[in-house]
Amino acid sequence: MFFFPYKLDVSLYRIPFFTVAACIACIAVFLSQVRSSHSFERRLVDYCAQQTSAELHAIVEAVGDEEIGRGCVNVLLGIRESADHDAAITRLAGEVKGLDFYRDRKQDFDYKQSVLKYGYDEFIALVPKDLTDKLAYRPDGYNVLTMVTSAFAHASWDHLLGNLVFFFIFASCVECALGYGAFVASFLLMAVVTSLAYRYSVVATEGLPAIGLSGVAMGMMALLTVLLPRARIWCFFWFFFFFRRFTLPVLLIAAWHIGWNIWDLKHMQAGDDINYMAHVSGAVLGIALGILFRLFAPRRLDELEMAMGT
């Protein structure tokens, strides 16, 4: 069975330049991420093969951590991807199995920890971060720039294309409804607010880096629903040999997606890599912005509904 909403049943009377530009930017950024990731992996393998000390090589091969695994590449990447690098090094030093440098346990542990730390620091100095790491927002700070750049970065083609389809469907109409200036301001505000909501929803030292346009896409969906509650969206349904194309109220589609994400947020498991807080906070902000526009520009929205035939 396959169900997919793909187009709003409204007519655009203005070209959504910034929506198109954002989609193109996301695709260009992702292609750059792929190239940067491949380059980073080659440099990492070269570092592990040629520039590690015998002690570090022995330690990383003896690490018994089930989550990270063993070996130079796995250990160094595991430390880099952890929220607290020093804590990860300390934990891994304690999980080295069958390898002792000193009889005294504390002295042996301290030595393993120092070798791991020196090796990781050297790795960071010699192997620059890849583009994804530079663009991602880390919830242990208030970097407004990465709050925005993280919205343009994605983890996979599925992640990218899924976000872009939903973003374009709703954002293109929001841009036509609000105008270019208000649309860009709403986009940036959604990127920043969803990042802040994520920061306050996790322990800063344990939260994973965040990337993706989904929080903004959810915000645009909610905003358009408040602006044009009578609009309808075309959907495609397939089940074995049964195909059908039909429209549903945008209010119903938005309620389904928002409700689904609220449920997921309340029932998420440890280790989930989907940022449900960004989705829900984006939707809440979209609703709030829609209410503000309805309060301060009701005549403009009435004219818009008439022009779009909703």
Image: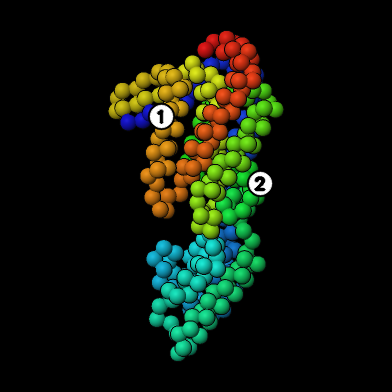
Tell me the amino acid under the disc marked 1.
Trp
Q: Quadrant of residue 171?
A: top right
Q: Residue at x 60, y 20 (%)?
A: 295
- Give above or below for 7 relative to 165: above
The answer to whether marks 2 and 1 mark residues whose Cβ atoms lie closer than 8 Å is no
Q: Quadrant of the N terminus?
A: top left
Tell me the amino acid under the disc marked 2.
Val
* Residue 249 horizontal/vertical position (percent): 44, 19
Depth check: give the residue in front, 215 or 65. Answer: 215
In the picture as drawn, the residue positioned furthest to the left comes out as: 240
Question: Is residue 114 in view from this perspective?
Answer: yes
Left or right, 105 with respect to 16, comes to left
* Residue 32 horizontal/vertical position (percent): 62, 47
- Give above or below for 181 relative to 246: below
Depth check: give the residue in front, 194 or 38. Answer: 194
In the picture as drawn, the residue positioned furthest to the bottom comes out as: 103
- Other-residue count near label 2 (Cα within 10 Å), few / some / many at <14 / 14–19 / ≥20: some
Q: CA distance from mark 2 to mark 1?
A: 31 Å
Q: Quadrant of residue 304?
A: top right
Q: Secondary structure at mark 2?
A: helix
Q: Residue at x 40, y 18 (%)?
A: 246
Q: Residue at x 39, y 66 (%)?
A: 66
Depth check: give the residue in front, 101 or 262. Answer: 262
Question: Is residue 308 in view from this perspective?
Answer: no
Q: Name the image colouring.
A: rainbow
The residue beneath circle 2 is: 144
**For residue 256, which numbered disc appears in the image?**
1
